[in-house]
Amino acid sequence: MAVQEVNLLIHSATQLITCAADGPKRGANLCDIGMIPDGALAVTNGEIVAVGASSVLRSTYSASQEIDASGMVVCPGFVDPHTHAVYAGDRVNEFEMRVGGASYLDIMAAGGGILSTMRATRGANLDALVAQTRRRLDVLLALGTTTVEIKTGYGLEPNHELKLLQAIELLASSHPIEIIPTFLGAHAIPPEYAERSDDYVELVVQEMIPRVADWHRNSWFAQQRPDDALFIDVFCERHAFSAAQTQRILAAGFAAGMRPKAHVDQFTSLGGVAIAIQLGAISVDHLEVTNADDIALLAQSDTIGVVIPAANVNLGVPHHAPARDLVDAGVALALCTDLNPGSAPCYSLPLVMGLACRYMKLLPAEAFNAATINAAYAIGCGDRLGSLEIGKQADILVLDVPDYRHVAYYLGGNPVQQVVKNGRVI
Ligand code: NIG
Ligand code: FE
């Protein structure tokens, strides 16, 4: 057979981790990372065209660019399926208050927390927001995150929420990292609506959702992927949105063509899991205090469970989401950073994988699938991202470690040697 020309050949990887899957990975399958020793892959026009043994691929393909990954691990780009990366300012003062003993919910009830970031974000113009966020995306990409979901939720007013969506759109069309947008107008009750949260819910339903749906229809995102729905999220929690309010907002979003997601069971179990599943949510996120009944419900659904070890580590709370029980029950589990200025100022999925192994008793292989293929399914991209398989987008990492388990084993380093996004070496 004649040698075929391709754009890029990565070969001689000590371990090629494919995370190959025919759907979200559950149960024992979450341990299967599809390892090929001395592996290689070929890429043309941003797409993976071959995956296999180095000896075979090196004699079949000739590439204009080659990467010798001897001694290293090659794996899919990491996918971060839950962040609040667009915001202004920081909350380092609250960090210090929490270290001194104040709780996250106390600070939030006293008008700090999400509302303090809301004030900073409302005060920032579009250019400032884009500039601050761009630096965060650079850090994410350097740590191996090639696709990131970003939520609004610090505007909490129609024009400011749209400003956040515009910032996300400007970044998506100009930064190599791929961005999946989520509308989270129901992240907190803004001060103008204190004591009348139902009125704020009506503002979200009557004004924000229609305007946001309109924005999305004409956005760069809809041009790129006309079939992809915008996600809508709600923070279902005490001092935020009740179960009934969550249901009302997600149902209104669904009716406007959006796909639900929800922050549920972070501190209080209000029944958000069942509501979200019933509305066909693509994911339910947090799950720190999810009970056995809801675990069983989730296991029987197509909804992905997204857990956030960095949040409680950051908040100094010893308890964690029951990730081991979730996996053993058959829930399709994913990991995220939750990158935000309050509960999780965390950029690093490698660190999150390390925390998930230690605090949630995931095996390194499970953490790997949870931060790649399952994370991609949590944001509707599992069919095209999250694994190294023929036909998938060439989002690839070369890790300077001899064994994939080193990623979770080291805490706080950066194993990423090279990032390939959409076939392009960054
Ligand atoms: O996922 N819980 C609600 N939202 C974020 C926190 C955002 C913030 O603290 O600014 C979360 O933890
Ligand atoms: Fe969050």
Image: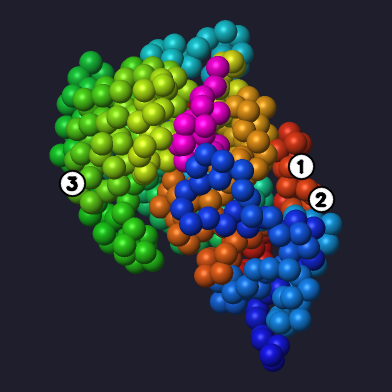
Q: Earlier in the sequence, mark 3 or mark 2?
A: 3
Structural distance between the alpha carbons of marks 3 and 2: 49 Å
Q: Residue at x 46, y 36 (%)?
A: 330
What number is the disc on residue 255? 3
**Vertical side of 279 occupied by 12: above or below:** below
Judge by depth and name the residue closer to the eye, 252 or 140. Answer: 252
Amino acid type, residue under disc 1 in the picture: His
Look at the numbered disc 2 and give the secondary structure of its residue.
loop
Q: Residue at x 75, y 56 (%)?
A: 15
Quadrant for the C terminus in the image: bottom right
Query: Callout 2 environment at 10 Å: few (<14), some (14 to 19), or many (20+)?
Result: some
Q: Earlier in the sequence, mark 3 or mark 1?
A: 3
Q: Residue at x 25, y 39 (%)?
A: 279
What number is the disc on residue 172? none
Amino acid type, residue under disc 3 in the picture: Ala
Would residue 217 appear left or right of 417 to someone viewing this image? left
Examine the rendering and report whether any part of residue 136 can be seen: no
Residue 98 position within the rendered picture, expressed as x and y whole percent measured from the top left: 56, 14
**Vertical side of 423 occupied by 34: above or below:** above
Residue position for label 2: 402
Structural distance between the alpha carbons of marks 3 and 1: 45 Å
Would residue 134 appear left or right of 196 to someone viewing this image? right
Q: Quadrant of ligand 1?
A: top left
What number is the disc on residue 406? 1
Look at the numbered disc 1 and give the secondary structure of its residue.
helix
- Segment tinted magenta in the rendering: 319-337
